[in-house]
Image: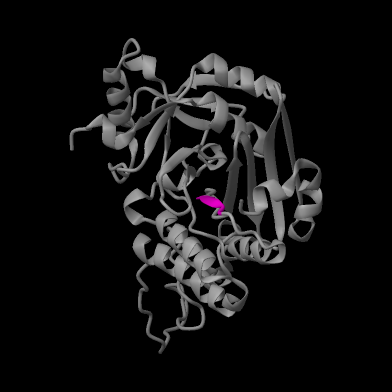
Amino acid sequence: MRFVPKNKQRRHPDTDAYQGLSPAAFALRAEDKGGLSVTWLEYFGPASPANVVAGALAYRESLQSKKLGAEGLFAAAPVAAITNMGKTYGKALRVVHAPVPGNDGHAEVRHFTDDDLRLLDQLAADVFSQIHFVKALNLPK
Amino acid sequence: MQPVPLDLTLFGSLPDRARPAFTVPTLGESAIAFPQADFTIRSETSQPSRSVTVPVAEPTLGEQLFDATAQAKIWTSKVAMHLDPTTRKRFFSQLDRLHDEDEWVGADLPVNLGSYKGLIRTVVKFGIDNGPSLALMPSGNLLAMWEVDSNRLSIEFIPNDRARWVLSRKLGEYIERAAGETAIERLKAVLEPYDADGWFVGR
C-alpha cells in the first residue's frame, strides 16, 4: 500500500469531498529513492484490518516527522495488478522487499518511472482501489 | 578556497522569487545558503573581512508554503479582471488546501508559479467554468482534473505554458485512452476529438 497525502487526492473543487486518487499519487517523490515506495501489507500478517494498521504505523515510524495528515490515506493493490499494469505500458515492474529504518515492511516498485501519465492515471483509477483513510484507522499517538 | 557556484538544479522548478543566487564555500561541509547580495562568505584562510556574516535562518515549512501560495494569489490579482470572483475564490481555496501544513509530507515542492500561471491562462483562454479539481505533483506542478460521467481528463501544467494531458473516455463497452504533451494554447484543439467542451464547459 502507498500513502497518499491530501494534496495528491482528487477532491471536489468546492466542497473538498474525497472523490478518488489523482495521478499525482504515483508521481515519484524525493522519498522514492529506489522506485515507487510502498509498504508490503502481508509482511505484517495475513490480510486483515490489523495488518493495515500495523503497516500504517510502520510507515509513520519511517517518517522524519513521525506524523500523518488526518486527511491522508493508504491505497492498496495486489502485487500482480501492479505488475500487470506495468506490462500494459511496457514496463517490467518488480515489487521488492526493501526494509528501511522504522518500516521493516517497506518495499519498492522497481523499474518504475513516472513519465507516462497514462500509467499514473490507471494506477490511480483502476489498480490501487482499496482505500484506508488515516482517520478511520484510529492509529495510536 | 574560492567560492564556487551552487548547483541550482534542485531549485529549477521553484518560482523565480524563491530561487536564490548563492555562492557556497568548498569547505567539505554542508552547504549553507546566504543571499549573495546581503552577505560575504570568506574561507578561514582568506584575509580578514570587515563585513559581518550573519546566518540566515532557513524558512520554515510553514513559511515556504505561505510564500508559494501568496505569490500565486498576488499574481492572480494582476489578472483578476479576467476571472470571475467565483472561479478565483475556488482556486484560492484549493491552493490553501493543497498547502495545508498539517497534511504536508516529505520533500515535495509547493506550487510552482509558472505552472499556476499556465492553469490560469488556460482557464481564461478557453473560458473554463466547471472546476477543475486540483492536485499537486511532487515537482510543484499543478494537476487539473475533470470527471464527467465515466470520463476523466487530467492536465499537468508545466512551466512555460506547456501541458501534459491524459484522458479516458467510455464509449459503450470500450474505454478510449489518450495522452500527450502540447502548448496550452493548443489544448482545446488537441482535445477537440475527445469532446473537449464536455469537460471544459459547465453543464
Q: Is residue B64 found inside the magenta-colored segment of the image?
A: no
Residue toward you, A65 or B184: B184
Residue at image coords 64%, 23%: A86
Please, is residue B162 above or below residue A57 in the view? Answer: below
What residue do we see at 37% from left, 73% from top?
Answer: B56
Q: Is residue B10 above or below residue A87?
A: below
Residue A57: quarter of image: top left
Question: Residue A42: image x %, image y %?
Answer: 38, 14
Which x, y percent locates residue B202? Answer: 61, 54
Q: Residue furthest left?
A: A141
Residue at position x 64%, y 55% in the image: B157
Q: Could you say where residue A93 lies in the image, as x and y percent from the top left?
A: 61, 22
Q: Is residue B131 left or right of residue A100?
A: right
Instruction: Name the residue at 28% across, 42% down.
Output: A66
Is residue B33 visible in the rendered structure shown here? Answer: no
The magenta segment is: B131-135
Q: Is residue A28 above or below residue B97?
A: above
Q: Quadrant of residue B78?
A: bottom right
* Residue lying furthest bottom: B50
Going by the picture, which residue comes out furthest to the top? A46
Instruction: Inspect this view and state whether residue B170 appears.
Output: yes
Question: Relative to A66, does residue B46 appear above or below in the rendering?
Answer: below
In the image, A66 versus B30, the foreground residue is A66
As drawn, is A1 to the left or to the right of B20? left
| Residue B23 spot, x, y in % from top left | 53, 71
